[in-house]
Image (cartoon, coloured by chain):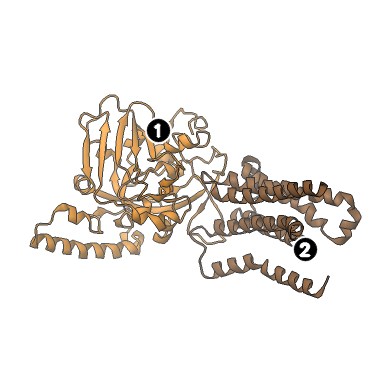
Chain colours: A brown, B orange
Amino acid sequence: MKFNQIYIKRLIFIASLWPILSIGIDIFQNNVGANPVEFIERHFGKWTLIFLCLTLSMTPLRRITKINQWILYRRMLGLFVFFYASIHLLCYIGLDYQFAWLDIKNDIIKHRYVLVGFLGWLLLLPLAITSSDKMIRRLKANWKKLHSLIYVIAILGVLHFIWLVKKDITEPLIYGVIILFLFALRLNLFKNRKL
Amino acid sequence: MTASKIKKIPSSEITPEYIYNDRRDFIKNLGLILSASALSTFSHKSIAALSTLPSFVESKNVDKDKVSSLKDITSYNNYYEFGTSKSDPHDYADKLKTDPWSITIEGAVNKSLTLDIDELLKLIPLEERIYRLRCVEGWSMVIPWVGIPLNSLLKKVSLTGNAKFVEFVSLKRPNEMIGQKDDMLDWPYTEGLRLDEAMHPLTILAVGLYGKILPKQNGAPIRLVVPWKYGFKSIKAITKIRLVEKMPLSTWMKANPKEYGFYANVNPEVDHPRWSQLTERRIGESLLSPRLKTQMFNGYQKEVAHLYQGMDLNKYF
C-alpha cells in the first residue's frame, strides 16, 4: 500500500467512528429524547445500513472511476457494518431487554422483523471471521461465494426496517432503493464486461 | 378501584408539587377572570380562549404511579395527522386551529346535540384522572389528564334502542394537519367503542393535561382516553360522536385488519405481529432501567374485566 493510501485509510477509519462520537455527544447533552433506549438502538441500526450501502458502493465506484484504490477500503467498511450491527444487537439485548434471554428468544421467534434482523447479523459473522488475508488465501474461490452473502444481508437489513415500521415506510424504502441501485450497477457492469 | 374513589392518605403526601403550583396559577387567573368579567361583559368565547381550565377535582393517584414529565408527554407522540415521527406532533401541531370548535353528538339519539367546548365544560364538572397509557408499540407513560366522564355526556342525550356502539370522528383539515397531505391513513381518523365501554366510568373525554388546557399535540381541544386499551383507541381532536347500531370500523382496522382489532385491549397474552406485548418500556425511566411487565387491561382489570367475560380475547383482539 502506498503512503497516501495508508493515510486515506486511517482517515476513513477515524471518520467511521463518527456514529460513536455523535451518540456520545447526544447522551452527554441529554439529547436522546423521551425514549433513549429506542433512540440509541435506532441510531446504530441506521448506521449499520449506511455502512452497508458504503461497502456495496466500493466495487461499482472502482469500475466507474477506473481507480482500483476504492477496493482497499471495502473490507474495513464491511467490518464496520459488522461492528455497528453488533452494537445495535447489543443495545437490543442489553439495554432494551437487559439480557432477559427468554423474552429475547420469544421476541425473535414471534416477530418477523426481529427474526430477519437477527438472521442478518448471524450471516455477518462468517464474513467478519473470514475477512483476514490468511482466510482469503485459504478459502480461495469459496471466499467470493461466501462473501456474496452480503447481498442477502443487505436485503434482510432493509426488510428488518420495513417490517419494523407501522405505516410510513419512506425511510426504509430509501435504503432499499439505494441498495437495489447498487445491485443494478453490478448487473449492468457485469454485462458490459462480458462484451 | 375506580379512579374517583378516595383513599385516606394525607393529600400533602400524594399531590405532586406541580399541582400546587398550578393551583396557585389557577387562583391567580381566576381572580383575573372574575375581575375582568366584573368590569366588562365578557362573552364566554373569550374566556374559552384563555389558557386555564375551569377548576377540577384533583386525582388522588391511588395507583401511585410516577407521573411522566410534561416534556415527555408533549414531545413523544403518535399523531399521524401531523407526521409519522414521534416529534412531528410537537413540531407541527401548532398550525391546528382549535378555537372555535364544536362537537356533535348524533345518530341513534332522540335529539342530536352540538356544543362548543366551553359550553361542554359548563355542563359537566371536570375531574383529573391519572392514567397509565400503553402504546401498542410497547412503551407507556403515566398521564395526568383533566376531563369529563364520557358517560356524563352521553347521559345528556337520550339514546334510542339502536345505540349499540359509539363511533368517534376526528378532523380532516390537511392545510392545518400537514400529515394528512399523505394518504397514510384514511382521514379523518375514526375510532369506536361498544356502548358499555363508552359508558364505563374510567372512559373520559380529556380537555386538559397537567392542570392546563390540553396541548395540541396531545389532541386538543378534546380527545378520548380509554386507559385499558392501546393508545391508538384514544382518538384525538374529536368533532363527532355518533351512536350507531353496528360495530364501526376504526382507521387502524381499515389500514391493517390483521394487526389491529376493534377491541385493542391491553393484553400481555395476545401478541402483536410486530411487538411483544409481554413487557413495556416506561418513558422517562433511566437508560438502564428494565422493561416493565405489561398488566392485563393495563392494570385496570378489576374495573373492566367483567365487560369481556366469556369472550375469546385472542379472537376479539
Give amino acid for label 1.
Answer: Leu
Question: Label 1: few (<14), some or many (≥20) within 10 Å?
Answer: few
Q: Chain of mark 1?
A: B
Q: Which residue is identified by label 1?
A: B307
Give the tally of numbered discs. Answer: 2
Residue that appears at 48% across and 31% down: B316
Residue B1 x/y as whole percent: 37, 44
Q: Is residue A103 visible?
A: no
Kindly report the distance in space between the C-alpha atoms of the residues bearing marks 1 and 2.
Answer: 71 Å
Q: Chain of mark 2?
A: A
**Residue A45 seen in the figure:** yes
The reply to whether dot 1 and dot 2 touch (C-beta < 8 Å) is no
Report x, y in % for residue A29: 52, 70
Relative to A60, is B270 on the left or the right?
Answer: left
Classify mark 1: helix, strand or loop.
helix
User: Label 2 neighbourhood size at 10 Å, few (<14), some (14-19), many (20+)?
Assistant: few
Mark in front: 1 vs 2: 2
Q: Which mark is residue B134?
A: none
> In the image, what residue occupies the spot 60% across and 48% down?
A161
Vertical arrangement, residue B208 with respect to residue B203, above or below: below
Q: Which label sits on residue A67?
A: 2
Whether labels 1 and 2 belong to a single chain: the reply is no
The one of A187 and B265 positioned closer to us in this rendering: A187
Location of residue A126 with respect to A70 vertically, above or below: above
Q: Position of residue B185 (x, y in %)?
A: 45, 41
Task: Please tell me whether residue B255 is drawn above or below residue B118 in the rendered image.
Answer: above
Say which amino acid is labelled 2: Ile
Q: Residue at x 86, y 61 (%)?
A: A133
Return the x and y of residue A114 as percentages of the image width and height.
63, 46
